[in-house]
Amino acid sequence: MKAIGIVGSPRKNGNTEIMTKHTLRAIEEEGIETELITLAGLNIQPCNACNACANKETCPIDDDVFSIYQRMKAADAIILASPVYYGSATSLIKALMERTGHMGRSQGRIWSGKVGGPLVVARRAGQNFTFAQLTLWFQILGFFIPGSTYWNVAIGREKGEVEKDEEGLRTAWNFGKNVAFLVKKLKT
Ligand SMILES: Cc1cc2nc3c(=O)[nH]c(=O)nc-3n(C[C@H](O)[C@H](O)[C@H](O)COP(=O)(O)O)c2cc1C
């Protein structure tokens, strides 16, 4: 059993990464293997609508997406985490969602039945909209999305500030526990 957390911030060691690691620790505690993937510094291009993936599990865009896609495919749970940029998820994570979502859908609903959900951090506003954006990806692809004790959103601006948001981190932790619970229920 494996869960992966994908951090869609272009900034390494930032608040989104801290929040995601926190969630992964809660999952790991339940005996599930975890992996953190940070998109910062990677080459992640948007979908160009060529539809090559409609017939074959491939993507002609030569960047870092295909290897991430394969790791996502092998996981039982996927967490997509993004900071809010101008009221929205980052273009970095959005590009990954377009590409992997499309590739997977053309392969016979490979995401269906996996567990997943979003994590969001912002300085002040836009968390719920971004949370909904990410949730829509999980929904259309047939993931099971566990809840928590609040929406999985937190507050922080400068690197590390999210550590002060005790409720935000607690929500992320409880979400991780529910992810682990559901993965175990589905796999055993
Ligand atoms: C380009 C850009 C746009 C941003 N837009 C918003 C915004 O719309 N709302 C908000 O509350 N914070 C906004 N922020 C602040 C980030 O969401 C915040 O600093 C967050 O903690 C960054 O996460 P990270 O440390 O994982 O990179 C923005 C930051 C940047 C760089």
Image: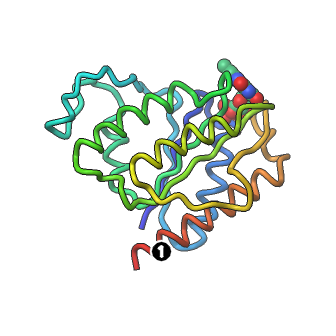
Residue at 71% from the left image edge and 45% from the top image edge: 153
* Name of the residue lying farthest toward the bottom: 188
Q: Is residue 161 visible?
A: yes
| Above or below for 95 versus 168 | above
Q: Is residue 158 visible?
A: no
Pinpoint residue 187: horizontal percent, then vertical percent. Answer: 39, 74
The kind of residue tagged 1 is Lys
Pinpoint residue 20: horizontal percent, then vertical percent. Answer: 62, 49
| Above or below for 25 versus 93 | below
Residue at 83% from the left image edge and 53% from the top image edge: 166
| Above or below for 165 versus 178 | above
Residue identifier under label 1 = 184
Q: Quadrant of residue 24?
A: bottom right
Badge 1, how many Cα within 10 Å: few under 14, some, many 20+?
Answer: some
Classify residue 98 as left or right of residue 70: right
- Quadrant position of the C terminus in the picture: bottom left
